[in-house]
Image (cartoon, grey):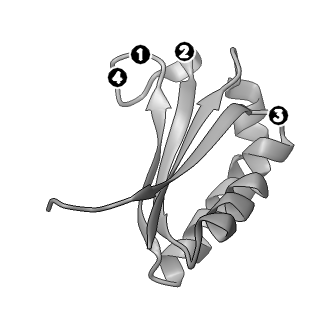
Amino acid sequence: MLYAIISQDIDNSLELRKSARPAHIERLQQLRDEGRLVLAGPHPAIDHTDPGEAGFTGSLVVAEFDSLELAQQWADDDPYVAGGVYERVIVKPFKKVLP
């Protein structure tokens, strides 16, 4: 089943994001290589694809896991969690309808 992992950053998270990003991206690439990643990306803090120093306010990952518990465990183990980037993470079942 698909799950949406919706994360909210702490204020002024950009430097923490930069530090933890390589390990965060590595885990996402692993999901991609396993054919389980639907989409992933950050929410820019401003209405621009490259927010620069404004940074980001959170992230969205939609991926396939065998259960809600496994999706939550994967989210809990994210380097952005360990690195203090995320203030809050919500994991929910997701039903893809379109496209």
Looking at the picture, which amino acid does disc 4 mark? Answer: His
Q: Residue at 56% x, 32% y: name it.
A: 58
Residue 16 in picture, x, y percent from top left:
77, 32
Q: Between marks 1 and 4, how big is the CA–CA gap?
A: 6 Å
Marks 2 and 4: CB-CB under 8 Å? yes
Residue 79 in picture, x, y percent from top left:
78, 51
Identify residue for label 1. 46
Up/down of 80 relative to 49, above or below: below
The residue mark sitting in front, 3 or 2, is: 3
> Under tag 4, what secondary structure?
loop
> Under tag 1, what secondary structure?
loop
Q: Residue at 55% x, 24% y: name it.
A: 57
The residue mark sitting in front, 1 or 3, is: 3
Identify residue for label 4. 48
Mark number for residue 84?
Answer: 3
Identify residue for label 2. 54
Looking at the picture, which amino acid does disc 2 mark? Answer: Ala
Q: Residue at 65% x, 27% y: name it.
A: 9
Q: Nearer the viewer, residue 34 or 66?
A: 66
Left or right, 69 with respect to 4, comes to right
Residue 69 in picture, x, y percent from top left:
68, 66
Q: Nearer the viewer, residue 63 or 68?
A: 68
Q: Between marks 2 and 4, how big is the CA–CA gap?
A: 10 Å
Q: Quadrant of residue 14?
A: top right
Determine crowd level at label 1: few under 14, some 14-19, many 20+ residues with C-alpha closer than 10 A.
Answer: few
If the image is split into quadrants, where does the N terminus sit? bottom left
> Under tag 3, what secondary structure?
loop
